[in-house]
Amino acid sequence: MTTDTPSRELRSQRLNKITHAPHEKLDHAVKAHAPFATLSSYTRFVVAQYLFQSELQTLYRDPQLIALIPDLAQRCRAEQAAADLQDLNTELPVGVAGAVQQPGVAQALGWLFVSEGSKLGAAFLIKRAEALNLSHQFGARHLGEPEGGRAAGWKAFTRILDELPLSASQEAELDQGALAAFERFGVLLEHAYAGSAAPQADVAQA
Ligand code: HEM
């Protein structure tokens, strides 16, 4: 390698770049629903988070993916989101057609990139949830700081992702997975806020 070799963009940096616009769009969509204005609006947001996490549960438990990311199973937040819904006296929602089905490893990593990255924004969201008297121990467990810290968890994930050998077609599948994940969260968000049955937010004292 010569000294004038331009430094190559990391894979995670490329993913950050290509998902910037979808993230902006989703951020606006989330905020448009004012999820922290009332407990019942927040509950709908948790429904979306639960649906998203539960769809990804098979990826978080996949032995092939765990072979690449040893702590993958512990990173899933489906259980925390389910417990949050229980705290909020809300039944677990039934699944929504269109969940990701048996993606290849590279595509799965794109989905996981988005799910794991969303823990960074959760640092801001949990502060708003606190204004609703919720916390990482009650109602906002899925937004809580992961063991070992958000930054460390994210760095460990992206380091593994950045170092994996992937073919050109797998790089494309990775990008596709990340974009599909943003798209899917948008669908689940609208699903959670649609419909007539506003969840009862009759919450017991934390
Ligand atoms: C389902 C996926 C995601 C959702 C629903 C989501 C949602 C949000 C929302 C609503 C905010 C605004 C928080 C506030 O202003 O109070 C935010 C901020 C943030 N998100 Fe995400 N996000 C997702 C994925 C990601 C990913 C993949 C990354 C990183 C690769 C990421 C990194 C961040 C960061 C660093 C912030 C802090 C402020 C900023 O830089 O915009 N998020 N996210």
Image: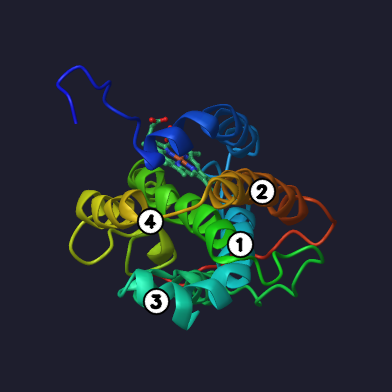
Mark 1 highlights which residue?
Answer: 52
Ligand 1 is within 8 Å of the C-beta of the residue at disc 1:
yes
Q: Are marks 1 and 3 in contact (CB under 8 Å)?
A: no
**Helix, strand, or loop for circle 2?**
helix
Residue at image coords 39%, 57% = 143
Q: Residues within 10 Å of mark 1 (few under 14, many from 20)?
A: many
Mark 3 highlights which residue?
Answer: 66
Q: Position of residue 67 (x, y in %)?
A: 37, 77
**Farthest-out residue, right:** 196
Q: Position of residue 93 (x, y in %)?
A: 70, 72
Three-letter residue code for mark 3: Ile
Ranked by sequence position, the earlier of labels 4 and 2 is 4
Residue at image coords 65%, 39% = 33
Three-letter residue code for mark 4: Asn
Ranked by sequence position, the earlier of labels 2 and 1 is 1
Question: Distance from label 1 to label 3 (Cα)?
Answer: 19 Å
Locate residue 58: give its quadrant.
bottom right
Mark 2 highlights which residue?
Answer: 180
Ligand 1 is within 8 Å of the C-beta of the residue at disc 2:
no
Left or right of 113, for residue 182 = right
Three-letter residue code for mark 2: Ala
Q: Are marks 2 and 1 in contact (CB under 8 Å)?
A: no
Q: Mark number for residue 133? A: 4
Location of residue 183 with respect to 195 vertically, above or below: above
Q: Say which quadrant the C terminus sits in.
A: bottom left
Three-letter residue code for mark 1: Phe
